[in-house]
Image (cartoon, rainbow, N blue to C red):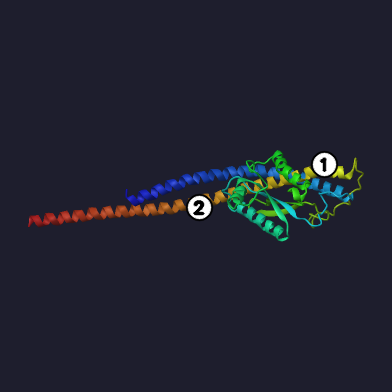
Amino acid sequence: MGAQVRVYKRRIRSVTATKKITKAMEMIAASRVVKAQRQVAASTPYADELTRAVTAVASGSDVQHPITTEVENPTRAAVLLITSDRGLAGGYNSNAIKAAEKLTARLQGEGKGVASYVVGRKGISYYGFRNQPIAESFSGFTDNPTYADAKAVAAPIIEALELETSEGGVDEIHIVYTEFVSMMTQNPVQKRLLPLSLDDDSSTEDEAPKEVPPLYDFEPSSEGVLDALLPRYVESRIYNALLQSAASKHAATRRAMKSATDNADDLIKSLTRLANAARQADITQEISEIVGGANALADANAGSER
């Protein structure tokens, strides 16, 4: 076997081993995304209903509360960015980071300071490499987040909301995550969690008109009810965003690994053709040498007979 053929064979074995890895990762991501989809479907109605409840309570009272009260001159905002702990997911992390950078630039353009809260090692590494300050960072659970993880993320943000801006507090809370639309579509989005806009109507044209919110009597007070609902609202929204991001990451990984597997197949076919051509060239050369040697031997014998 010629040297060139050995090189091709070695490359084929290497690509084949890589293909096995990418295929396995594709299958793992495909199984995980199904579970993540179920979790998103289960958590979204709760988060939506809790938002409606908070809106109804806030609209039924005239108390000044951080949930709905717009600060007259906001000077500081919290931005929560959700990325993943691992890569190999195409543009999933970079798209979310770009959305967070765009939001940060807009807030700073409005004269607001920004406190960055980052979930996922990829986002933490991005900010750390550029020496950008991070108020709090969280990692180790992005592939399979739980409600306890959401509470851990929400706790310092809620605490910052309750502080004065001069003491490191914030006037607004924004979140940047990747919304799971389908297996082929995942969109980075940014939303303001607080203050909550009471006239925000998220219904579509196909939905039936919303009922008029009922009137409530509050015990002990509307402010006490809102104080109790504030952490639940933030935690449920962050939990839903974590689940959406996890499902999006698994879908992006599956798509990226499928593309890598297909590329490995194409490369193996190409290398196999090159190896066959090199082997055929070696065989042709050997036959030519044998024929040439036989002709030379025949000429030599004919000369000796004369």
**Badge 2 density bin: few <14, some 14–19, many ≥20, Cα 10 Å:** some
Horizontal arrangement in the rendering, residue 206 relative to residue 245 (left or right): right
Q: Residue 201 placed where, x, y %?
A: 81, 55
Query: Which of marks 1 and 2 precedes in the sequence?
Result: 1
**For this view, does 106 lie left or right of residue 12?**
right
Q: Can the viewer see residue 41?
A: no
The disc at residue 228 is 1
Tell me residue 60's x, y (percent).
89, 49
Residue at the far top: name it. 148
Residue 208 picture location, percent across and down: 83, 54
Q: Find residue 46 and report its image quarter.
A: top right
Q: Which residue is mark 2?
A: 263
- The disc labelled 2 sits on which kind of residue? Asn
Dot 2 lies on which element? Answer: helix
Q: Residue at x 44, y 54 (%)?
A: 270
Q: Residue at x 21, y 56 (%)?
A: 292
Is residue 20 placed above or below 174 in the rendered structure?
Answer: above
- Decide if residue 302 is in sight here: yes
